[in-house]
Image (spheres, rainbow, N blue to C red):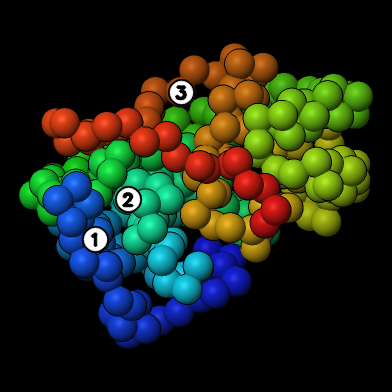
Amino acid sequence: MLIMSKNRVDFETLMGVETPEATDSHMPIPHHTLVVEVRKAIAAAGLTVLEEEHGLSRGGLRYFGGFAVTGKGIDGEDRQVVIGVRNSHDKAFAAAICIGNRMLVCDNLCFSSDVKLARRHTLNIMADLPRVIADAMGRVLSHWNDMTLRIERYKATAITESQAADLLVRLVDTKVFPKSKLYDILVEFRKPRHDEFAGENLWNLYNAVTEFLKGSDQSKLPFRTMTMQSNLDPIAHHVPEIEVQEIVTKGCEDNPEPDGTDLRD
């Protein structure tokens, strides 16, 4: 499985999801329209789709999908680039293109770049859509290289079990995962189910956390993994080259997203 969603659907089902009517301040994007535009941009960037999956939640109001892609300079034996796509019809969060990695040994998924299409789905969003998605595709290679450096530095950063426990508490405080998972993740760090992640370093702690993010609300996964990186990068002396990008329509009020505020799933 690619996106580890509890509610995976095919594209035909996605096309059948009803899109709410537009208002003067809110123009919902049909989930399937966003997928079609992303497919076009992936092809235009010279990338090849290896896998594609889609998931729905809240009765179809929220969508999260993933495209595992490959291309020149971004193919690896241990990981794949994943283009994540999310959308909401209930104003819960902005439509966004997320760039991440899937670790092939365990299917753990993490994101470290997020291109938001708009704070709210305003009336001009459809005009911005192709340009912003194309821009996101242009960041794939730099993301791959940045993640390569992050992994190297995380692996080179030794931590004790006590330090790991302290970091996990910090991640709970910053809403990466609920406190109910803390002990289980610490046990995963001590005795990982995958031999590749054995040892006391930051990379293995990172994968212990992502192992327990499987099956959770995938629309929150970009927030959670990027927040985790913002906590761990300084420890590994890694300064990411890629920053979150937002396209905010003129006159659009800031509408903070609820990502991470509800950690029940």
Q: CA distance from mark 1 to mark 2?
A: 8 Å
How many residues crowd mark 3 within 10 Å: few (<14), some (14–19), many (20+)? some
User: Mark 1 = which residue?
Assistant: 29
The span from disc 1 to disc 3 (Cα, nearest Å) is 31 Å
> Can you tell which quarter of the image residue 49 is in?
bottom left
- Tag of residue 172: none
Given this view, does label 1 or label 3 mark the residue nearer the observer? 1
| Label 2: element kind | loop
- Quarter of image, res 118: top left
Mark toward the start of the polypeptide (1 vs 3): 1
Amino acid type at circle 1 is Ile
Identified by mark 3, the residue type is Pro
Q: Secondary structure at mark 1?
A: loop
Which mark, residue 95?
2
Q: Report the residue at 83% width, 47% height from top.
A: 180
Amino acid carrying label 2: it is: Ala
For the residues labelled 1 and 3, say whether their Cβ atoms are less than 8 Å apart.
no
Residue 105, given in percent of the width and then of the height, sits at 66, 58
Residue 206 image offset from top left, x and y in percent: 69, 38
Does 8 sit left or right of 95 as displayed?
right
Q: Is residue 128 left or right of residue 97?
A: left
Question: In this picture, is 182 found above or below 35?
Answer: above
Q: Say few, some or many: other residues with alpha carbon within 10 Å of mark 1 (under 14 / 14 to 19 / 20 or more).
A: many
234 with respect to 38 (left or right)? right
Q: Residue, x 51% and y 42% (percent of image)? A: 258
Pinpoint residue 62: horizontal percent, then vertical percent: 43, 63
Secondary structure at badge 3 equals loop
Which residue is drawn at the image coordinates 14% and 31% (left, top)? 250
Cβ atoms under marks 1 and 2 closer than 8 Å: yes
- Which residue is under mark 3? 240
Q: Is residue 11 above or below residue 41?
A: below
